Amino acid sequence: MAHTTRRQFMTKAAAATAGIAALTLAAPARADGHARTHQVAIKGFTFQPAQLTIQAGDTVTFVNEDGAPHTATANNRSFDTGRLTRGQSASLRFDQPGRYAYFCEIHPMMKALLVVE
């Protein structure tokens, strides 16, 4: 499985539209010190779950279970998993609270929402 490294993510984040800082990898983990990892399955041309609520400092792993390639790309371009083929995954840590709508760049009808508290 392919994973997005911090360097790859930071390069993509730096290329995002100026003034958008939805994700940071240098911020401390959750106040309780127990960051969790959550999974979003990409299958049947949907993100499952379509809405996920996590705590700041948690990580989300996007796993493509479809035969077609997909991305998980923030509407405001603040994050992007890159193109994931069947069996590939990308993990991103979310430190900033907010609501992050995202979609698949290849199949724009695929939409979901991540809420970071």
Image (cartoon, rainbow, N blue to C red):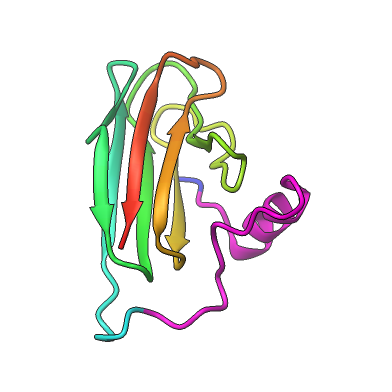
Q: Quadrant of the N terminus?
A: top left
Q: Position of residue 90 (x, y in %)?
A: 47, 47
Could you say which is closer to the camera, residue 44 or residue 101? 101
> For the stretch drawn in magenta, what is the main secondary structure?
loop
Question: Vertically, is 13 above or below 57?
Answer: above
Which quadrant holds residue 52?
A: top left
Could you say which is closer to the camera, residue 20 or residue 48? 20
> In the visual, does 66 lie left or right of 38?
right
Q: Residue at x 34, y 16 (%)?
A: 45
Q: Residue at x 27, y 48 (%)?
A: 39
Q: How many marks?
A: 0
Q: Position of residue 94 (x, y in %)?
A: 44, 61
Q: Which residues are drawn in magenta?
A: 3-29
Q: Residue at x 44, y 62 (%)?
A: 93
Residue 8 in magenta stretch: yes
> In the visual, does 1 lie left or right of 40?
right
Which quadrant holds residue 95?
A: bottom left
> In the visual, does 25 lie left or right of 100?
right
Q: Quadrant of the C terminus?
A: bottom left
Which quadrant holds residue 35?
A: bottom left
Residue 53 in magenta stretch: no
Q: Residue at x 63, y 56 (%)?
A: 9
Q: Position of residue 87 (x, y in %)?
A: 39, 34
